Amino acid sequence: MAIDVKICGLRTPEAVDKAVQRGASHLGFIFFGPSPRNIEPDDAARLADRVRGRTKIVAVTVDADNDMLDEIVSQLDPDLLQLHGHETADRVLEVGAIYGKPIIKAFSVREADDLRGLEAYQGIVERFLFDAKAPKGSLLPGGNGVSFDWRLLAALDGKVDYMLSGGLNADNIGEALSLTGAHAVDVSSGVESAPGVKDLSRMDAFFDALDAATADERARSRM
């Protein structure tokens, strides 16, 4: 089973190159001031240009207004926009119409009720992203290094296309895939040595663990 992998919160050429070398399908650049992974659009564009065409470029925003999106899209020209705030379905439709980019809509999950609002967005987003709800006191909607109960996703319609996020790392990616059957994953803090500092050895460890997990799954499917 081929797994899409998004490495998010990239800020250096070395991390961008490593992610693509290891087979990341998506690279995420975060435009949110309080985040230690925040990056300016022109800096993100220079990093993206190193690997453009070899992976999908994702601009991650949180309740961004049109002025901010104008700057990001004009400078970075991302392949997708990830809306990681409280954007309504109407706002998602508006953003899609203005910028002509496929959209990933993030949902913060702690309990089953947190998944009840998906229906309003189905058909207007490219893919959902399920992340853990932020711990109390955190200013960040994602990248907090915490997970949610992955078993909650068993209740989803099998047609829901989503990317699994929230506290994933080399130690738990096998369990996460086994419990959810996810076809796409997103990792940020799980490949860092400190908030916002990507660790190339941890990135290698994550991809190695992912490769091992998918190899095990292929072996089981042949039995």
Image (spheres, rainbow, N blue to C red):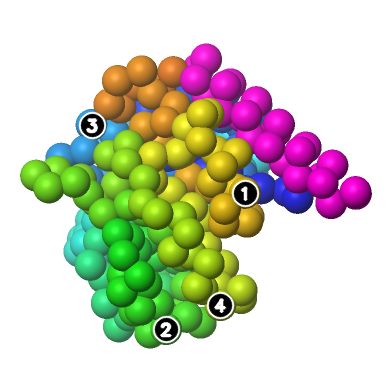
Residue drawn 36% across the image and 32% down it: 189
Which SS type dominates the magenta stretch? Answer: helix
Give the residue number, with chain letter if any, for mark 3: 36
**Mark 4 vs mark 2: which is more N-terminal?**
2
Give the residue number, with chain letter if any, for mark 2: 119
Q: Is residue 219 magenta?
A: yes
Q: Residue 143, percent across and down?
A: 31, 40
Foreground disc of the pair 1, 2? 1
Foreground disc of the pair 4, 2? 4
Give the residue number, with chain letter if any, for mark 1: 178
Foreground disc of the pair 4, 1? 1
Q: Residue 217, percent across and down?
A: 76, 45
Foreground disc of the pair 1, 3? 1
Q: CA distance from mark 4 to mark 1?
A: 17 Å
Residue 133 makes an appearance in the image: yes
**Mark 1 vs mark 3: which is more N-terminal?**
3
Residue drawn 21% across the image and 38% down it: 35
* The magenta segment: 200-223
73 or 134: nearer the viewer = 134
**Image disc number at residue 141:** none
Q: CA distance from mark 1 to mark 2?
A: 25 Å
Amino acid type for the residue under numbered disc 3? Pro
Foreground disc of the pair 2, 3? 2
Pointer 3: residues within 10 angstroms few (<14), some, or many (20+)? some
Give the residue number, with chain letter if any, for mark 4: 157
- Kindly check if marks 1 and 3 are in contact, taking CB atoms under 8 A apart as contact: no
Residue drawn 60% across the image and 48% down it: 177
Foreground disc of the pair 4, 3? 4
Q: Residue 215, percent across and down?
A: 77, 37
- Kindly check if marks 4 and 2 are in contact, taking CB atoms under 8 A apart as contact: no
Residue 37 as seen in the image, left or right of residue 96: left
**Mark 4 vs mark 3: which is more N-terminal?**
3
